Amino acid sequence: MTTLVSDDVVTRLARVTAGVDARAGDLDAGHTDVRDDLRALGAAGLFGLRDLPDTVRVLEQVSAVSLAAGFSAWAHQMAIHYLADRPDLSEALRTAHRPGVTAMAAGLKHVAGLGQIPIHAGETRRGLRLSGPIRWASNVFDDALVVLPARTAAGRLYVVAIDVGAVGVVVDPAPSLMALGATGSTSLRLQEVEVGAERIISADLTTFVRRIKPTFLLLQTAFCVGVSGAALDAAERVIDPLAAQFDGDRADLAAGAARNRRILYEFASAPDEVNVADVIRLRLDAANVAVAATRLESTLAGGQGYRTGTAANRRFREAAFLPVQSPSEGQLRWELKQYE
């Protein structure tokens, strides 16, 4: 699998992940946030890479040492992906001089047939005027750039980019989150936010979502695979008579994790050729394996698995987020049934 990833990326990534690893406890405890990690990745040239397997490796390895950092890196990378044709907006994200925010969950749900977009867009001579809630977004720091969907009363669907600091953007107080408090995750409200025509990324949300969805799900799968690998590596290091009672569980999970990782890199090598149902199925299974692997690690760690401040406990709490992250496990199951 490593042959799919350039040696240069592996070398640069090793330096950055060492720093993320050293900060993982402080991120988990809320003593700092992910911005330094995003900047380190940007300074190393690890955002906006040409080849998707390289980006998969970045998110996999960062998430193996901190899902908080890996999740934020995913959100940032997706904003870059959305703006692939807009270097005027994406260049500052590639270097991580400013954070990128993906607020596209409502757009993906709408295209799947699961709800209306809550951001209303009034068309003006200069562009759009937006009002409505963004119920969940991450990397919501003062200088962040947000990519989101909006709809007009006539049913036209847009994708736009706005600044968190723009007039009319209200950032709600951040909720207290388990394991992901360092990710700048919260809700926002837009109150007649003016968007110039130059900030309209697409006037065809459906086509836009269908284009970005495989990459969206594959990169989410990457951080699931990273967490699984770290948890199973730790579980494998526990050797005693009681741990031996779980050898079958470890073997089954290791086989599932290896299979998911192999398929992930295969799909990432040709994302335009994969069947969307297969990507959804992979994303579902990778999250389930990650949750099960962290539970096994915590079980084998004994009291250390219940003690905050330990890696086993942190991964257990981090992985609890995976079934509810958008698209949630329920949404993915529903979508998969539409292909059956």
Image (cartoon, helix red, strand yellow):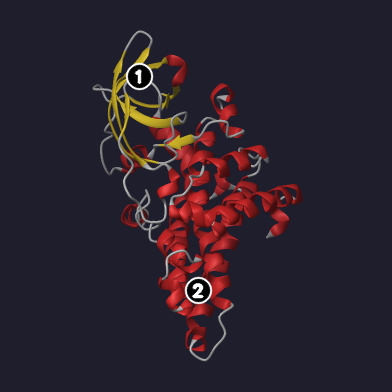
119 or 310, which is in the foreground? 310
91 or 167, which is in the foreground? 167
Task: Look at label 2 and name its amino acid.
Answer: Leu
Q: Is residue 220 visible?
A: no
Give residue 263's quadrant in the image.
bottom right
* Residue at disc 2, secondary structure: helix
Q: Nearer the viewer, mark 1 or mark 2?
A: 1
Q: Earlier in the sequence, mark 1 or mark 2?
A: 1
Task: Look at label 1 and name its amino acid.
Answer: Val
Q: Position of residue 180 (x, y in %)?
A: 42, 51
Q: Position of residue 203 (x, y in %)?
A: 40, 24
Q: Is residue 67 above or below residue 91?
A: below
Answer few, some or many: residues within 10 Å of disc 2's Cα (few below 14, many 20 plus, some between 14 and 19). many
Residue lying farthest to the top in this orientation: 125
Which residue is pictured at 53% across the width and 50% down the height? 274
The number of numbered badges drawn on the structure is: 2
Query: For mark 1, what is the residue?
Result: 167
* Residue at disc 1, secondary structure: loop
Which numbered disc covers residue 253? 2
